[in-house]
C-alpha cells in the first residue's frame, strides 16, 4: 500500500503543475557559454543562452581550464577531508589570500558554496545578545543563516532606507552588543544595487557592522570587479560571495572580513568545520579566474555595452523592463503561466531564458530574468531581441 505521505506529495506536485509553478530542468550537452548545445528530443541543438550567471564569460575560459587541470595533476582529484583535519592545501591558502587582496579585506575563508558561507557566517559571531537587521529581499541563504543564529531579527523593506533606520532604532532599543545590517549587494531577481552609501551612514550612526552578499556583483561592479562596496567607495565589514558566478562559475563560496572575524569562522562555522574542502581543481581554477577578473576591464566594458544594447532593443520592442544598470535585465510578465509560455516559445526559437515566479519572486511579479554576458556578440543580442519580439506578438504581450 502507498504511504499517505507519497499521495499527499503527488497532490501537491500536481497543484504546482496546474498553477504553472512547476520547474523543469533542461539538459545542456556542451560547455556553459553564450551559445550552448541542448538536447531537444534527442537532437543536439544550439541555443543562445541568456540565463547563466556567466557574466564575464569565464565558464569555459581555456586558461582557467588549464589552471584547473594543472592543479589536478599536482594535487589529485579530491582531498577526502575537511580543512582542519587534513584538507588544507597551500593552494587553498593562496586562494584565500588572493580573495582577501582582491576584495580589500585582511583575510578570507573558503566554503563549499556561498550558500554555506551565508549559512555559517552569523552563528559563530552573534548570540541572543546581538541583533541582525536584514533586507526583506535578501537571498534565501542569508535568511537561513540568520535563522540558524540566535540574534534578534529585524527586517526592513527592500532598499528602503527610512525603514532601515526605523528597524535600527527598534534593534537599538533592545540594547544589543552588536548590530549587523545584512544585505545583498545586488538583488538577484531585480538587478537592483544596494544603497551602500546610505547603509554605511546609518550603520555608523548606530554603531552597526555591514554584511554584504556580493554574489551578483563580484566580477561586475567596482574598479576591478571587486564588488558593490568598491563600486560605491564604501567599506563593507563582512563580505560573502561565490566562485560559482562571474569567477569561473564552478562552485565554492567565501567570506572576506577582518582577521578576528575570519579566525572565529575558521574555529566555529559549522559548514566549514563539518563539510569537505574545496577540490584542488576548483581552487586552482579560481585563482586564475580572479587574475582574469582583476585584469578584466575589457570584459566589463563589453558586458556594459551588451546590457545597454539589449535593454534598448527590448524597450524599443515594447517590453516592460525593470529599470537598472546591471547585466540582470528582468522582463516583467506578472503572470506565471505567461512567463512560462514566453520562455517555452523562446526556447523553440533558439533563445534560452528562464521564467521566475512564486516562490522565487512575490506572487503577481512573474518575470523572465535575462542575464547578459561579456561572451555575447551584438549579433547574438539582435537575434534574441528579434525572437522576443516575435514571441511577444504571438502571445499577445506586445500590441
Ligand atoms: C547564487 C547566490 C548564492 C549562492 O551561491 P552558491 O555559491 O551557488 O551557493 C548566495 N547569495 C546570492 C545573492 C546568490 O545570488
Image: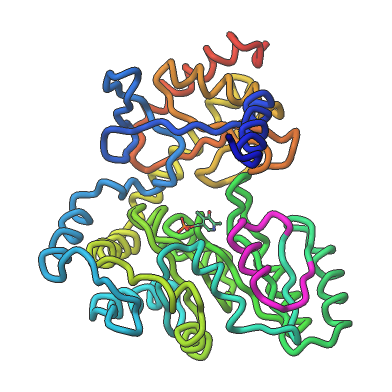
Q: Which residues are magenta?
A: 136-154
Q: Residue 398 placed where, x, y %?
A: 65, 14
Residue 88 position by quadrant: bottom left
Answer above or below: position of 212 versus 336: below
Q: Can residue 185 be seen at all in this image of the molecule?
A: yes
Residue 199 position by quadrant: bottom right
Q: How is the image coloured?
A: rainbow
Residue 210 position by quadrant: bottom right
Q: Residue 14 placed where, x, y %?
A: 64, 27
Q: Residue 197 placed where, x, y %?
A: 67, 68
Point 46% across, 37% down: residue: 51
Point 81% across, 74% down: residue: 168
- Residue 146 falls inside the magenta stretch: yes
Toward the viewer: 76 or 98?
76
Q: Tell me the quarter of the image containing the C terminus.
A: top right
> Which residue of the protein is positioned furthest toward the front in this rendering?
1
- Residue 391 falls inside the magenta stretch: no
Toward the viewer: 133 or 29?
29
Task: Report whether 172 appears left or right of 347.
Answer: right
Answer above or below: position of 380 versus 122: above
Q: Can residue 311 be seen at all in this image of the molecule?
A: no
Q: Total of numbered circles in the picture? A: 0
Q: Residue 316 placed where, x, y %?
A: 59, 22
Answer above or below: position of 363 versus 76: above
Q: Tell me the quarter of the image containing the N terminus.
A: top right
Point 43% across, 28% down: residue: 352
Amino acid at each position: 500500500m502507498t504511504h499517505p505521505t507519497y499521495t499527499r506529495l503527488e497532490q501537491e506536485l500536481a497543484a504546482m503543475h496546474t498553477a504553472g509553478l512547476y520547474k523543469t530542468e533542461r539538459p545542456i550537452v556542451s560547455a556553459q557559454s553564450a551559445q550552448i548545445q541542448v538536447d531537444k528530443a534527442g537532437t543536439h541543438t544550439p541555443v543562445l543562452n541568456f540565463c547563466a550567471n556567466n557574466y564575464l564569460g569565464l565558464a569555459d575560459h581555456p586558461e582557467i581550464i588549464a589552471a584547473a587541470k594543472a592543479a589536478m595533476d599536482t594535487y589529485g582529484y579530491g582531498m577526502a577531508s575537511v580543512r582542519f583535519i587534513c584538507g588544507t592545501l597551500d593552494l587553498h591558502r593562496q586562494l584565500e589570500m588572493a580573495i582577501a587582496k582582491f576584495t580589500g579585506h585582511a583575510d578570507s575563508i573558503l566554503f563549499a558554496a556561498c550558500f554555506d558561507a551565508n549559512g555559517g557566517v552569523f552563528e559563530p559571531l552573534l548570540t541572543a545578545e546581538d541583533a541582525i537587521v536584514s533586507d526583506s529581499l535578501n537571498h534565501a541563504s542569508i535568511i537561513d543563516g540568520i535563522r540558524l543564529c540566535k540574534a534578534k531579527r529585524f527586517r526592513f523593506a527592500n532598499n528602503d532606507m527610512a525603514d532601515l533606520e526605523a528597524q535600527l532604532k527598534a534593534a537599538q532599543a533592545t540594547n544589543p552588543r552588536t548590530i549587523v545590517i545584512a544585505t545583498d549587494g545586488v538583488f538577484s531577481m531585480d538587478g537592483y544595487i544596494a544603497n551602500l552609501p546610505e547603509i554605511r551612514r546609518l550603520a555608523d550612526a548606530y554603531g552597526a557592522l555591514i554584511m554584504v552578499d556580493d554574489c551578483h556583483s563580484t566580477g561586475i561592479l567596482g574598479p576591478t570587479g571587486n564588488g558593490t562596496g568598491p563600486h560605491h567607495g564604501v567599506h563593507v565589514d563582512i563580505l560573502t560571495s561565490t566562485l560559482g558566478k562571474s569567477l569561473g562559475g564552478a562552485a565554492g563560496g567565501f567570506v572576506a572580513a577582518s582577521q578576528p572575524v575570519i579566525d572565529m569562522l575558521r574555529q566555529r562555522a559549522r559548514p566549514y568545520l563539518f563539510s569537505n574542502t574545496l577540490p584542488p581543481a576548483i581552487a586552482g581554477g579560481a585563482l586564475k579566474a580572479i587574475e582574469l577578473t582583476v585584469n578584466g576591464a575589457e570584459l566589463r566594458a563589453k558586458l556594459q555595452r551588451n546590457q545597454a544594447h539589449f535593454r534598448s532593443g527590448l524597450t524599443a520592442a515594447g517590453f516592460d523592463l525593470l529599470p537598472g544598470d546591471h547585466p540582470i535585465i528582468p522582463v516583467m510578465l506578472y503572470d506565471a503561466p505567461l512567463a512560462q509560455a514566453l520562455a517555452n516559445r523562446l526556447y523553440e526559437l533558439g533563445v534560452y531564458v528562464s521564467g521566475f515566479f512564486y516562490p522565487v519572486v512575490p506572487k503577481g511579479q512573474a518575470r523572465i530574468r535575462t542575464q547578459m554576458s561579456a561572451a555575447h556578440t551584438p549579433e547574438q543580442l539582435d537575434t534574441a531581441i528579434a525572437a522576443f519580439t516575435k514571441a511577444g506578438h504571438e502571445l499577445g504581450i506586445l500590441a
